[in-house]
Each structure stands twice: as C-alpha cells, then as structure tokens.
Image (cartoon, rainbow, N blue to C red):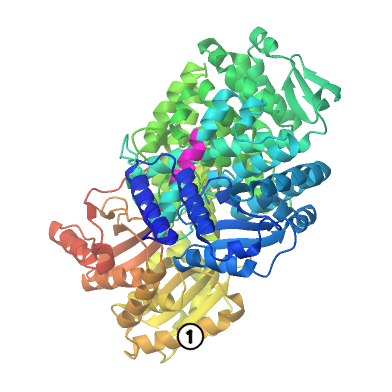
C-alpha cells in the first residue's frame, strides 16, 4: 500500500472502483470483495495505530471482529459496518482513543458504523441474556488482532450459550420471524417488496443459517446441502436466487443513494434497464424483471418455510421414527400433523398419489411435509398425458378446488411444487407474471388463487355476514363448480403476448384445456363465456349510465340466462376484491348490485316487461301530489311539469319529494346543498339545487376537489324553469370527526366560486403542484380519448383514460363547457393505474356530437389540459360496443 495515502483514502478509492466494476457486471463477488476491502482498512489502521501499542496487547489481548452482514461477508453498497472491539480482560481507558482513531474516519466518509467494546466475559454473559446480541455474535468473523481471543469467544458461545439455550433461541427466532413477516408482509405478493425483511427476503436466508447453527451445528452455508437439509439442486437454486436478490439490493442502494431495501415503484424501471431486461412477448422490461425477482423470492420463501418447519418443529433426531403414524389412505400417512408418502416407491407404483396427497391436504387441513413436497417435485415426470386426462385426477382436482379455505393455500402449494403447471401447462405463463401498475396488487398467479379463495368465502358466508346475499345467490347455482374453474382460469390469457385482450385469449385457452380433459361442450362454453365476460359487468356498472334502459337491455342480450348472470356477478365481485383495494369499494358494490338486479329482471321478464315510461311518470305524479311537502296544489303541479322526463323516469318518488323541499329552500339563494350519509357505506350523496348557468358542474367539481372530496359519479338534471339539480356521490371524508366542518367549508367555497370571489383554477394548480411533489408514481401509460355515439340513443359518451391528479375532473368539465357541451351524467372509475372519466353529453342545442369537426375539437380541448398532455395521446374515434373490452 502506498505510504503517501491514508487507509481511509485507499478504502474510498477501492470502493469506488469496486462499485464501478459491479455496475458494469464485471464483479460477480461484490459482497465478498466489499467486505475484504473493509478488512484491509481495519488491518492497515490496526497496524498503523498510535494508540494500540500503548494498550499492552500482551497483557490484555484484543481483537477486531466483524459482525452482522459484514461478518457474513455480505456487505452491500450502503449496508452498516458492524464491528466488535473485544478485550480478554477489562476494557482499558485507551479503548476510546482506538475507536476514535479507527472508526471516526469511517463516519467522516458517510458510512454507518455500529460498534461495541466489550470484554470476553461480558460478551458471553450478554449473549446468554439477550438473543439479539447472540444473533450478531453468531455471524462474528475475525478481522485483525489476537486471533486466539476470537477462537475463545466462538468456543464459549458454542459450548456455554448455544448448547444450553438452543431450544429457547430457536423459539425466539421463530417468534421474531412471525412478527417480522407480519410487519413487512409477504414479498412474493407485493409489487413493492422489501428485499431484506419481507417474507421471501434475505433475512429469511439469514434465519435459516442462525437456526441451522443452533439446531444442527452447521458452520458454513454449504452445510445445508452436505448435512442433507437441502438437495444439491435446491442449494444450487438457493445460491442463484440469493445472488439475484442481492444484486438487485445493491443496485437499489446505489440508485437511491442510501440503505434502501423497499423496492419502490420509482426505482423499478431503472433497475430493469440496468439489469439488461428487454420487452418481450407483450411484457414490459420492468414486468419481466419483477417476475424474475418474485420467482427468486418465492423460491427463497419456500425453502425458508420448509427448513423452519422441520427445524423448529423437530424434538430430536429420531423424532419422525418414534412419532405415531396414521395412514389416511393407501400410500399417504400423517406424522406430526404433516403429510408424508409412505415411501418413494409407492409413488412409482401409484402415480395418482401425486394429486391425492394435495386432496388429503385440503380435506384434513394439514400441510405437506418438506419431504413430501420434495418428492412431488422430483416425480413430476410421471404427470404424463394419461395422468392429465384421468377422470379420477380431475375429480381430485375439483375436490381441492371446492374445499373451504384453509389457513394455508393448497392450490398455492401445487404451484410451488410444480404440480399445477405440470397438470395444466397453460398456467406457466401467469406464474410470477406482473402487471406493472398501482391497481393490481398481486402477481397474476397469486391473484387467480385469491379469486378462488374469495369465491369460496362468498359461498360459505353465514346468515349474519355482510356477504350473506352472495351466499344466497351461490346456493341458487346449478353448477357452482364451473364458477370455481372460471375463477381459477379467468386471467390465464395474461400469460400470452399481452394484457390488452386477455379475456378473449383466456376464453380460447380455456376451451382447449377443458376439451383436452374431457368436459362436455355445454360446460366448456359456460366456463369460456365466464372468462370472456369477466370484466363486462364491472365495466358496464362503472362506465355507463345504468339508468339508461338501452344499456341494461344490451347488457342482458350479451348474457345467455340468469344462471350465467349469477355466476358472472359472483366472479366479478371475487375478481375485484382479489385485485386490490383500488379495485373494490362500497360504491362499486352498490353499482354492480343495482346492475345485477336490473339485468336479472329483464332476463326473467323479457325486454318489454318494463312498464311504459308514461305509466311510470303518471304513477310518480300521483305519489308526489299526495306527498307530505309544503308546496301544494297548482304550484306543485306546475313544478312537476317543469321537471325533465329523464329526471322523472329515473328518480324515485321519495327522492323527488326531497328535491321539491330543496327547491323550496332555494328561494333567492344561488344554491342549496344537502348531504346524506349512507348507513354502512363509505360514500356520501351530495345534492345541489341551484339556478342553472353554463359551467356550474365544473365549478362544483372544482370546489369538491379543493376540499379533498373524491367524486365517484354525478347525475345532472335541468328542469324547464332553469333549475339545476346535480346529484353527486362522493367518497366519505377521511377525517370523520371534522366532516361537518368540511361541508360548511364546501358551502362557503362554492358560494365564493359562483360569485367570482374564488379563483378555482389558481387554487387547484397550487394543489396539483403540492400533489406532484409528494407523489412516487410509476411511469405513465398513454392517455386515451374515446368518443362513442352508438351506445346511447340520446347522448354522446366521452371516455377519457388518464392518470389522476387533484382538479382533473374540474379541468376536463371546464374544457367540455368551453366546447359548448352540457354534461348529463358523469362516472369516475379506474382501469389499472389510470382513472377513467366517462361523460354523457349533448351540445347546447340538445343534440348529440357526431360531426367530425366537433369530435376533433373536443379531443383537442381535452388534449390541451397540461397534465394529460405530458404523456403521448392515444385516441380512438371508434364507437364502443358491448361487451366493453378495453
């Protein structure tokens, strides 16, 4: 080493060179090399120390020991540097000087250094009292100093601490493991996984090592294979998984400039590019990267759980041999509440046991043992075409599919062992398949399993459950098994060349699967149609005016019968719930339920069963005139005649009476606002009765946004006496304690906005800037504008797909007003990570917008909205048709 450079300068240079090589892909042993250059620093600093010689090392030997990840030689780019300064006897006063001399320079260059200064006796005592200390010492590694002292420490830890407290330590590790997983979640189910602490993260591997050292006296990771805890292939795959995860973690540290282990959206695209992933088969590079990562973390999670199940549950070396055995069927037995094969030979003799053991697992609620899972994987070559087509195998699969949900997922275990994809190869495409947006929380395979579990939970809901109505519909099904099959396969089309038309692709794949395994044509058609239409009801409910009878009739025509409708309704609920919190809420539940009952009525009674519009209006007029309102006689009749036909047709009599009272309160005021709490629902109904004028809707939308009220939908009615009645469904305010104050502020702001005293555009622009600075967003998808003149007889439907931001609805509605358009219905929904704003409009003359010039002008006006204009615009002038496939 050059005498002209200090050890800290040399360390900095070596680290910069090492990171540069790593980023180029030229340093496969980065973790070990990083630890070694730190070792070099400590050794050189120890040799050059001016304090060390005064500490009389011959009388009181001392040693510098690496701990934690540094001790394991797993030193990531921005990981802590944990060290122990260990003395044989008492800690001398000069120790502080040595710490200052050796460790302070590391702090000065920005490293996070954790250190402890202890005597040998103190160290062993603390290790027996505090398992956190013991855990750090288990990873201890000699760096420099008197090596015999390090050896003494490790011998005492092994002989006096681990041997005595092994069982208590393993139990402590197990409890801490559960707490860590509860806090950080299952990384294999998350799109922003924690690479270190989550289930499937690196800490699971470390826990395997710590338990292995306490339980089996392993000294090196390779002992996991040498001592028979992992097969050669499993250990090799584990090493590859660890290498990939740590590479991602290192690049994440470098990219974020800090010790960051949460793989946030903002880093994922850059990491995918840095790791060389390319777009392929309809998948973005980042989706392929995340799929590869989830696959590795799933493998690590599985090995971790299997190892801990064996190590933590075992009571002794001969535990299995002495444990009571209980045969549950020929070739399968229960030992210690886990399932085993009687022997490998019995599988060769009866291959159907490969599926039967999962059936027993589902029936008994017992997991497969580590050994059984390993044997399933090793004998998958027996799953040939004859096996796949066997009726007994298919019946076993159906019993697994129908069994009530357990604390563990048998279907997921079939994926983990490879049994699922061996039996149904078409499922390979969705394993660890990622959809890169903020809407789909889970990888496609996990989402599919959650959909099946949700369907079974709906089926089994008790009479007092909020889901009791779904259970009643389930009981009415003639073939509920077909619905469960559809739930499993509803997204199988996403394993193809892209997500855009996955429902059609999935329907074709399903036909092929069930034809191969011998289902009758009628059942194949039912499952195929459920897969094809699984987005149909939710898109119709959230993007169309379901008060429009034409929409409901078109919806009914797409469905064969009420049996198909019921299955599709249940599948829609389960699919939405299993997708994530942004895909399901109280408002969507109400819309979907209303659409379901409307369509069921038409399917049961026929398209012409709905009473004539004139009869409906006449009946309502009688009810209103006889109602308890302050307005009476001729005045009430005159007001009724002012109400628009559309309003009278779709508004219940009870609501009309309430609106009449609002009109009475209006008087000379510019508006009156009334809010209703919907019991048990997370949304509010806000009704505004106002003197109509152009742009009223956009001002109301702007004021709601200014007060953090998210609009879900709006119905806009204009009476012939120039009174506007706008009915908004909005999400309930997050802070319910101050809800009254929020609505008071809405009243005040709306009054100011209508009088010109509140500059909405400026106020909302300020809110947008604050929002954008706080957001961590994934890259935007292209925006899309669709003009539809076919779905409705009376309105032009405008659909706008873009990324949401505060004030978006205000900006769009203001743009539509400037295009001389009246908005009659508005719906706000979601599609993946985009918001879908749908407007039913007519021009100021009451006509649809169907000329090419008008269509072009509308698109241009919307395009001018600055936030939408940030992304390339993708447009369509084609008319939407049902089913809506977007």
Image height of 234 relative to 200, above or below = above
Q: Is residue 245 magenta?
A: yes
Q: Residues within 10 Å of mark 1 (few under 14, many from 20)?
A: some
* 174 relative to 805, above or below: above
Decide if residue 55 is in sight here.
yes
The one nearer the camera, 391 or 178, is 178
Q: Which residue is mark 1?
A: 745
User: In this picture, which residue range is highlighted in magenta?
Assistant: 240-247
User: Most prominent secondary structure in the magenta stretch?
Assistant: helix
Q: Is residue 448 above or below residue 840?
A: above
Which residue corresponds to the image point at 50% horizontal and 59% vertical from the top-left? 48
Q: Could you say which quadrant of the image residue 758 lies in?
A: bottom left
Left or right side of 419 for 468? right
Would residue 721 be found to the left or right of residue 633 on screen? left
Residue 479 in view of the camera: no
Pinpoint residue 878: horizontal percent, then vertical percent: 23, 48
Q: Is residue 787 left or right of residue 685?
A: left
The residue under the point 51% across, 50% down is 39
Q: Where is residue 489 drawn, in percent x and y? A: 49, 33
Mark 1 secondary-structure assignment: helix
Query: Residue 806, how many percent across, how many down?
Result: 38, 71
Q: Relative to the observer, which residue lies in front, 549 or 826?
A: 826
Residue 218: percent from left, percent from top: 68, 34
**Magenta stretch containing residue 816, yes or no?**
no
Residue 58 image-quadrant placement: bottom right
Front position in the image: 348 or 243? 243
Left or right of 878 in this view: 724? right
């Amino acid at each position: 080493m050059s005498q002209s450079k200090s050890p800290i300068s040399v360390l900095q240079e070596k680290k910069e060179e090492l990171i540069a090589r790593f980023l180029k892909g030229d340093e496969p042993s980065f973790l070990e090399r990083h630890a070694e250059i730190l070792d070099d620093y400590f050794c050189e600093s120890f040799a050059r120390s001016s304090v060390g010689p005064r500490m009389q090392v011959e009388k009181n030997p001392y040693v510098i020991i690496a701990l934690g990840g540094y001790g394991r030689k797993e030193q990531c780019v921005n990981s802590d540097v944990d060290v122990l300064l260990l003395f044989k006897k008492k800690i001398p006063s000069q120790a502080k000087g040595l710490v200052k001399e050796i460790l302070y320079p590391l702090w000065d260059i920005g490293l996070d250094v954790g250190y402890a200064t202890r005597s040998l006796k103190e160290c062993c005592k603390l290790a027996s009292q505090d398992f956190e200390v013991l855990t750090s010492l288990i990873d201890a590694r000699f760096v420099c100093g008197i090596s015999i002292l390090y050896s003494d420490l490790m011998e005492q830890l092994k002989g006096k601490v681990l041997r005595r407290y092994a069982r208590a330590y393993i139990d402590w590790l197990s409890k801490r493991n559960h707490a860590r997983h509860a806090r950080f979640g299952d990384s294999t189910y998350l799109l922003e996984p924690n690479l270190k602490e989550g289930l499937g993260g690196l800490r699971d591997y470390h826990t395997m090592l710590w338990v292995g050292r306490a339980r089996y006296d392993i000294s090196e990771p390779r002992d996991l294979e040498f001592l028979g805890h992992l097969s050669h292939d499993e250990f090799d795959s584990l090493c590859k998984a660890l290498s990939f995860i740590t590479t991602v973690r290192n690049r994440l540290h470098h990219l974020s400039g800090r010790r960051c282990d949460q793989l946030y959206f903002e880093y994922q695209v850059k990491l995918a590019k840095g790791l060389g992933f390319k777009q392929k088969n309809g998948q973005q590079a980042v989706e392929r990267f995340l799929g590869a990562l989830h696959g590795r973390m799933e493998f690590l999670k599985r090995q971790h759980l299997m190892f801990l199940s064996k190590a933590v549950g075992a009571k002794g070396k001969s535990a299995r041999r002495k444990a009571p055995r209980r045969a549950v069927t020929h070739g399968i037995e229960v030992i210690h509440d886990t399932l085993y094969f009687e022997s490998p030979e019995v599988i060769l003799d009866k291959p159907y046991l490969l599926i039967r053991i999962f059936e027993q697992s589902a029936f008994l609620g017992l997991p497969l043992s580590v050994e059984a899972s390993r044997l399933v994987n090793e004998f998958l070559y027996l799953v040939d075409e004859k096996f796949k087509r066997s009726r007994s195998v298919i019946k076993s699969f159906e019993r697994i599919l129908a069994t009530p949900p357990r604390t563990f997922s048998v279907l997921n275990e079939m994926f983990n062992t490879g049994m699922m994809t061996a039996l149904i190869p078409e499922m390979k495409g969705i394993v660890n398949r990622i959809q890169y947006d903020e809407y789909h929380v889970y990888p496609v395979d996990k989402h599919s399993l959650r959909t099946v579990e949700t369907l079974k939970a709906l089926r089994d809901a008790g009479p007092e459950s909020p889901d009791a109505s779904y259970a009643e519909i389930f009981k009415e099904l003639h073939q509920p098994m077909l619905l469960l099959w559809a739930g499993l396969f509803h997204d199988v089309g996403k394993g193809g060349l892209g997500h855009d038309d996955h429902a059609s692709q999935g329907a074709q794949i399903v036909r092929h699967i069930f034809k191969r395994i011998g289902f009758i044509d009628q059942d194949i058609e039912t499952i195929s149609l459920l897969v094809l239409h699984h987005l149909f009801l939710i898109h119709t409910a959230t993007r169309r005016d379901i008060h429009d009878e034409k929409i409901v009739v078109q919806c009914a025509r797409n469905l064969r019968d009420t049996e198909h409708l019921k299955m599709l309704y249940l599948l829609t609920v389960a699919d939405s719930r299993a997708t994530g919190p942004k895909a399901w809420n109280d408002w969507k539940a109400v819309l979907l339920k209303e659409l379901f009952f409307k369509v069921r009525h038409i399917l049961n009674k026929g398209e012409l069963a709905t009473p004539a519009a004139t009869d409906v209006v006449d009946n309502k007029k009688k009810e209103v005139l006889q109602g308890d309102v302050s307005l009476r006689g001729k005045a009430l009749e005159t007001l009724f005649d002012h109400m628009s036909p559309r309003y009278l047709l779709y508004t219940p009599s009870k609501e009309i009476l309430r609106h009449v009272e609002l009109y009475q309160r209006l008087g000379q005021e510019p508006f009156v606002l009334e809010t209703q709490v919907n019991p048990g629902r997370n949304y509010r109904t806000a009704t505004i009765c106002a003197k109509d004028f152009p742009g009223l809707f956009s001002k109301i939308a702007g004021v709601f946004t200014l007060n953090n009220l998210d609009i879900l939908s709006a119905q806009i009615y204009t009476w012939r006496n120039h009174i506007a009645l706008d009915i908004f469904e909005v999400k309930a305010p997050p802070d319910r304690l101050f809800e009254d104050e929020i609505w008071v502020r809405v009243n005040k702001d709306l009054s100011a906005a209508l009088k010109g005293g509140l500059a909405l555009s400026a106020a909302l622009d300020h809110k947008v800037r604050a929002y954008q600075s706080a957001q961590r967003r994934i890259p935007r998808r292209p925006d899309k504008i669709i003009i539809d003149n076919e779905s409705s007889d009376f309105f032009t439907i405008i659909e706008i797909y873009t990324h949401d931001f505060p004030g978006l609805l205000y900006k769009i509605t203001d743009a539509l007003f400037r295009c001389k358009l009246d908005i009659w219905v508005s719906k706000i929904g979601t599609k993946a990570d985009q918001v879908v704003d749908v407007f039913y409009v007519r021009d100021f003359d009451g006509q649809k917008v169907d000329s090419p010039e008008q269509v072009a002008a509308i698109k241009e006006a919307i395009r001018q909205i600055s936030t939408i204009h940030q992304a390339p615009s993708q447009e369509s002038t084609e008319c939407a048709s049902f089913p809506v496939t977007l």
